[in-house]
Amino acid sequence: MTNADVIIVGAGPAGLMLAAELRLAGVRPLVLERQPQRRNTPKAGGLGGQILELLRYRGLLERFEAACTGPVPAPRFPFGGVHLDFTQLTDPPLHALPLPQPQLEQLLDERASELGADIRRGHQVTGAVQDEAAVTVDVQGPDGPYQVSARYLVGCDGARSRVRDWAGIGFPGTVYPEVNRLAQVTLPDTVTVLGDGGLDVPGAGTVQAGFTRTDHGLFGIGSSPGSQVVSLYTIEDESTEYDDDTPMTITELQDSIRRVLGVTLPVKEASRLSRFTFKARQADRYRNGRILLAGDAAHLFPATGVALNAGMLDAVNLAWKLAADVHGRAPADLLDTYHDERHLAGARTTLHTRAQVALRRGHDPAAEALRQVFQELLADEQPLRRMGALVAGTDIRYPMPGTGHPLTGTFAPDLTLHTDQGTTSVADLMHTARPILLDLAGRPDLRQTARDWRDHVDVHTAKTDDRPADALLIRPDAHIAWAAGLDEPADSAMPPLREALSAWFGTPSA
């Protein structure tokens, strides 16, 4: 029997991100993936939302941007049959990075491997049992069956998670009778991309930009003037059961467009073809003893563009907590906060994606009126920004005990920091995924308090313009665990700081 600190089942984006984050924290993960090779089917076409900032805080965003093969689209995103259009804002609250899932998984695989993660493809987990000390799994590998044990097992094995079943965790929710087809294609020169984003199709006339709703479904176009590369999208109500491992074809896409729109649209070639159904499901709990869930094993959302963001953020939240437990310095209930925080985030994502279902599925005049009113509201900047933050996942504030500062529980802002060694930033300090006490006001009293945790928490002193607080305690996932108010007295600031340090990082150093 071989051993690891943490076994991860599934080498998708959540599993690979978790493996890399665990290695940053000095933990030995073993990733077991049943498929012998990475899938070439691009189930997702890119990343969007808060995970892009987190990648920047790890120093990885430029590497991911360099892997993009196409131009970054204008900040205009579908939302339940209408659009969130941020093109008039200088600082959009929602960004996307076009990166098909096969390339994304390759980058995450390379990152985890560089850090020393053990990734085994073609190894299928066939059973798992846990006791008070460990989890033992049965594995069918290329050379035969074997067993491996670890302190924890994390199921990142998707919507049909067997790990979730073995843990006895419920997965309630709703299945919608929709089949969605999404493609990025190159159109022949006989089809003209119009200046407003619509298409002039020979023999069929003009197809308007954005969404077209018919009695048979929904058709969408995303295009850039002057380019023959466009994104196409259809939704139909179907009862057909599709195998996720069977790739969609150009013919299937064209047949769907013909059924929905009544138009034969010629296609030259496709760089992405994906088909999926919509479900709104969330695991009852993300942890049962030594078995935990992340990514699609924990939640499914009935809208595009959010699953990767949520799943990879699950991994970042979980990794440092698992590492603290493996290293023997975690407070007793630290792992329970993974469920508390990420179940909250999953419920928030479920909320807005279910709202999208209501917006897009209605076909009567009342539903059309709802979409029109909603689109009018989005013409104003404040509701537009609020919706952007909701979709991006940047509006999440985790509950933090013992402090009422407005920054606690939020993602740490990327402040420009001036130190004796030069200029740096919060993002630069987070590359190593270490906890940080950031003193922004020259507070030796607070630094001295944190010295008792010097083996677990790095202390930095810096100045910044318009400082938001005297000091920030930042967790490895870049969320603020505690903040000192401006000029807050020592007798008021120090006890809550000690409480926060104990709550998140355990007992003081020897």
Image: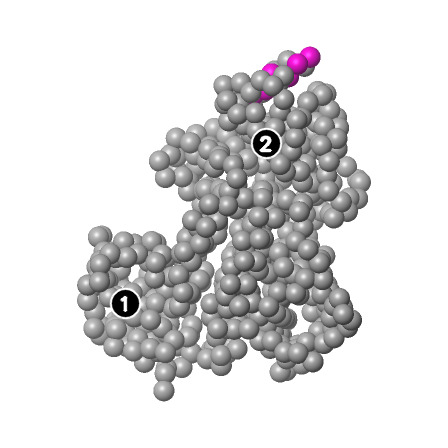
Nearest the viewer among 63 and 406 is 63
Nearest the viewer among 57 and 238 is 57
Image coords of residue 412 (percent x, y): 36, 57
Name the residue beneath numbered marker 2. 231
**Image quadrant in which you'd find residue 126:** bottom right
Residue 233 is inside the magenta segment: no
Instruction: Give amino acid for label 1.
Output: His
Name the residue beneath numbered marker 1. 460
Q: Residue at x 69, y 80 (%)?
A: 1
Nearest the viewer among 437 and 170 is 437
Within 10 Å of disc 2 (Cα), the crowding (few <14, some 14-19, many 20+) is: some
Is residue 254 visible to us here?
yes
Q: What's the magenta region?
A: 198-203
Q: Residue at x 70, y 43 (%)?
A: 277
Instruction: Give amino acid for label 2.
Output: Ser
Direction bottom: furthest residue = 510
- Which of disc 2 and disc 1 is earlier in sequence? 2
Q: Is the C terminus in the top left, top right, bottom left or bottom right quadrant?
A: bottom left
CA gap, disc 1 to disc 2? 46 Å
**CB within 8 Å, label 1 to label 2:** no
Badge 1 marks a residue whose secondary structure is strand
Q: Is residue 346 above or below residue 376?
A: below
Q: Residue at x 46, y 45 (%)?
A: 65
Q: Is residue 98 above or below residue 425?
A: above
Q: Which colour assignment does the render follow?
A: one colour
